[in-house]
Image (tube, rainbow, N blue to C red):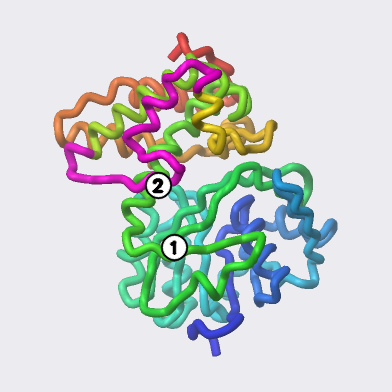
């Protein structure tokens, strides 16, 4: 029966792009009844090639198209016990209205989106649903038709609730954990995600960026700026890395040889990895800059905390997006 979370229940991934296809595909591989609500282009590619999922640790799985339900019709939400929302933040309200139209109230809705606004938007439009915020720590990038590669590590964190979900969804290749303070986790992830824009502006890989002391200096300055804003609002972020959030800027500023030794886990990433915003900017797609730097700027203004670096970064990203010429490949001194 849809809407009840016991055993392997029907899961609909609403907005199956890179993250949605990766998570949904691995859930299907472990026997979950998974529907990918996706664009026609994505559906056509999966039907032709199957879904190929790899990661930097050597995982390599192919999920045949027949092991998934593929559709672009939101009516598929009627069958969902769990809805994983993976659309861009700007599309949250539209998908929430489809969820409200098509699902019973006992359906669990989990936001696996960047930023702090998406889950609240879902709650506002779905007041009768069990809406939970979530945090995806890893990057997933397209590497070919219906082929997606996880290039960084980490476990998915979801907000704890009356119905336990982490154990239901977890598997060796995709671990979910519950959190009683998901907002603090999300703020910690937002601090890290501020680098999405810097990486996109740089045009280099994450690994190359982290091995460049000038780029790390910018990362540190931007995070320090944001930490001051959060402190002014009484917010204490929970780090998504082995280091506490307040120590990360200090570590980033260290000379590269020392940084490499102390922050070895930060460098456990695919050598070719770039951030999702880098791929969006390269493809001429809308970015989530307003939900990241834009949010910090707005919050800073509310408490009279200056955010000049975030403002410059937002300006450069918007300028590059308006130009429509791909990655600007700026140097740290350009920012």
Whether residue 107 is visible, yes or no, is yes
**Would you say residue 184 sits in the magenta stretch?**
no
Seen as rendered, the residue at the extreme bottom is: 1
Q: Residue at x 35, y 50 (%)?
A: 116
The number of numbered badges drawn on the structure is 2
Q: What residue range appears in magenta?
A: 231-258
Horizontally, residue 115 falls left or right of residue 138, namely: left
Residue 45, can we see it?
Answer: no
Q: Nearer the viewer, mark 1 or mark 2?
A: 1
Residue nearest the observer in this picture, 159 or 122: 159
Residue at 43% in and 65% down? 178
> Seen from this angle, which residue lies furthest right?
48
Q: Is residue 182 left or right of residue 11?
A: left
Cβ–Cβ below 8 Å for labels 1 and 2?
Answer: no
- Dividing the picture into quadrants, the one containing residue 174 is bottom right
Q: Quadrant of residue 298?
A: top left
Mark 1 crowd level (few <14, some 14–19, many ≥20, 10 Å Cα) = many
Q: Earlier in the sequence, mark 1 or mark 2?
A: 2
Nearest the eye: 38 or 116 = 116
Residue with the mark numbered 1: 158
Residues packed near mark 2 inside 10 Å, few (<14), some (14 to 19) or many (20 plus): many
Circle 1: element type: strand
Q: Quadrant of the C terminus?
A: top left
What residue is rendered at 21% in x and 38% in y?
231
Q: Which residue is mark 2?
A: 115
Position above or below: 137 against 249: below
Along the line of sight, the residue nearer the viewer: 91 or 28: 28
Q: Position of residue 300 (x, y in %)?
A: 22, 33
Instruction: Provide the secondary structure element on which disc 2 rests.
Output: loop
Q: Is residue 238 magenta?
A: yes
Disc 1 and disc 2: Cα gap in Å?
Answer: 14 Å
Residue 241, image x and y in percent? 46, 43
């Amino acid at each position: 029966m849809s809407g009840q979370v016991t055993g392997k229940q029907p899961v609909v991934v609403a907005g199956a792009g890179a993250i949605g296809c990766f998570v949904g595909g691995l859930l299907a591989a472990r026997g979950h009844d998974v529907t990918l609500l996706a664009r026609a282009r994505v559906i056509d590619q999966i039907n032709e090639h199957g879904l190929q999922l790899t990661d930097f640790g050597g995982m390599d799985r192919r999920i045949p198209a027949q092991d998934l339900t593929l559709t672009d019709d939101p009516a598929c939400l009627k069958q969902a016990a769990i809805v994983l929302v993976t659309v861009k933040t700007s599309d949250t309200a539209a998908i929430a209205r489809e969820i409200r139209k098509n699902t019973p109230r006992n359906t669990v809705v989990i936001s696996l989106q960047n930023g702090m606004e998406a889950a609240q938007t879902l709650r506002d439009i779905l007041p009768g649903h069990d809406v939970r915020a979530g945090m995806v720590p890893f990057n997933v990038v397209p590497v070919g038709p219906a082929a997606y590669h996880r290039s960084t590590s980490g476990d998915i964190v979801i907000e704890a609730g009356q119905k336990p979900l982490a154990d239901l969804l977890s598997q060796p290749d995709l671990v979910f954990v519950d959190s009683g303070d998901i907002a603090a986790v999300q703020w910690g992830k937002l601090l890290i995600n501020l680098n999405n824009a810097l990486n996109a502006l740089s045009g280099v890989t994450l690994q190359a960026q982290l091995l460049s002391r000038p780029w790390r200096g910018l990362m540190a300055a931007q995070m320090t700026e944001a930490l001051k804003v959060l402190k002014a609002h009484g917010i204490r972020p929970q780090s998504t890395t082995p280091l506490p959030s307040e120590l990360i800027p200090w570590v980033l500023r260290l000379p590269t040889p020392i940084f490499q030794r102390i922050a070895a886990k930060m460098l456990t990433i695919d050598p070719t990895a770039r951030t999702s915003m880098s791929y969006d900017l390269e493809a001429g797609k809308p970015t989530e800059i307003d939900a990241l730097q834009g949010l910090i700027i707005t919050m800073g203004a509310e408490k009279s905390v200056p955010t000049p670096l975030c403002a410059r970064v937002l300006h450069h990203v918007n300028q590059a997006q308006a130009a429509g010429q791909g990655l600007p490949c700026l140097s740290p001194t350009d920012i």
